């Protein structure tokens, strides 16, 4: 069994990634590692943020070999560390909110994530009066990862090297609606209407969304790296 550490504390994102990855894997998140550092997502691109999170957390895990690792592995095994950064790009706003999608409504640039409701309200406000044809947008996901063999003899992970990292990206085109539609999903899902559909991700439901979302497309590319 492969152990996959999803480098997130977001329960919604973790649930979605578990569903997309499938397989007979053991999944853990940063909530299982209370001492894990909080990595600032201050890069200019989604890929930069995803790779930064993987590198920072891999170094921490390899150097500190927290006791939590010993509970995860009963025999020599492999840990896959996966981190994603994703968000919404609106053409009329020249790509905003982009890498600041999760903290779009925050007043302070360095502030923590703002509530989904506040982010959605701000997006609707700045797009007020903008016609349908100019509300084109896309969800973008960058998923970085690395493979870290674990030895039960030394009770340590193998040293991390940035050369071992891989990156998978996915994009889902669509447009922004004129109001919240549906109560499903999270983030900007109730506002985002994917290309070829008349309903938002918030209305289409998890099964439909997971068939072609930005994260689904990135994870489909990722699966070739995760082998028993």
Image: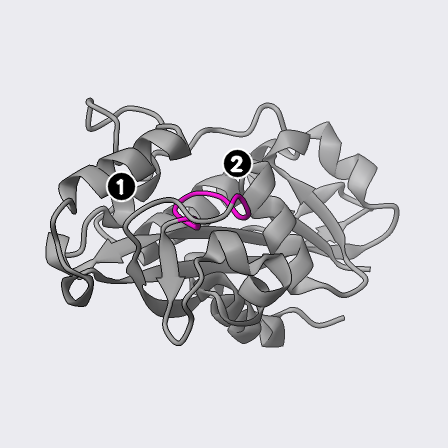
Is 131 one of the magenta-colored residues?
A: no
Height in image: 148 above or below 36? below
* Residue 2 locus on image (x, y percent): 76, 59
Residue 158 makes an appearance in the image: no
Q: Nearer the viewer, mark 1 or mark 2?
A: 1
> How many numbered markers are drawn?
2
Task: For mark 2, give the secondary structure.
Answer: helix
Q: Camera-side residue: 44 or 11?
A: 11
- Badge 1 is on which residue? 100
* Residue 215 locus on image (x, y percent): 49, 62
* Residue 210 locus on image (x, y percent): 57, 64
Q: Is residue 76 left or right of residue 6?
A: right
Q: Is residue 130 left or right of residue 73?
A: left
Around disc 2, counting alpha carbons within 10 Å, would you say few (fewer than 14), some (14 to 19), or many (20 or more)? some
User: Between marks 1 and 2, how big is the CA–CA gap?
Assistant: 25 Å
Q: Quadrant of residue 154?
A: top right
Task: For mark 1, give the secondary structure.
Answer: helix
* Residue 201 locus on image (x, y percent): 47, 57
Main secondary structure along the magenta-highlighted residues = loop
Q: Quadrant of residue 219?
A: bottom right
Height in image: 147 above or below 30? below
Q: Which quarter of the rendered picture does the C terminus lie within?
A: bottom right
- What's the mark number on residue 60? 2
Q: The magenta stretch spans which residues?
A: 183-190
């Amino acid at each position: 069994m492969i152990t996959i550490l999803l480098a997130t504390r977001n329960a919604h994102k973790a649930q979605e990634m578990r569903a997309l990855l499938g397989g007979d894997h053991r999944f853990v998140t940063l909530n299982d590692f209370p001492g894990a550092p909080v990595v600032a997502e201050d890069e200019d691109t989604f890929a930069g943020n995803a790779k930064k999170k993987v590198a920072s957390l891999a170094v921490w895990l390899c150097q500190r070999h927290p006791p939590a690792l010993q509970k995860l592995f009963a025999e020599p095994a492999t840990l896959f560390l996966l981190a994603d950064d994703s968000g919404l790009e609106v053409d009329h706003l020249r790509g905003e909110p982009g890498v600041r999608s999760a903290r779009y409504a925050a007043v302070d640039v360095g502030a923590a994530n703002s509530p989904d409701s506040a982010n959605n309200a701000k997006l609707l406000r700045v797009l007020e009066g903008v016609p349908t044809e100019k509300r084109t947008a896309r969800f973008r996901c960058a998923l970085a990862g690395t493979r870290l063999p674990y030895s039960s003899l030394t009770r340590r992970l193998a040293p991390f090297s940035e050369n071992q990292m891989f990156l998978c990206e996915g994009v889902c085109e669509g447009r922004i609606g004129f109001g919240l539609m549906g109560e499903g999903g999270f983030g900007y899902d109730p506002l985002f209407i994917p290309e070829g559909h008349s309903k938002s991700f918030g209305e289409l439901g998890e099964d439909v969304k997971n068939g072609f979302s930005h994260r689904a497309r990135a994870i489909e590319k990722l699966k070739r790296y995760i082998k028993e």
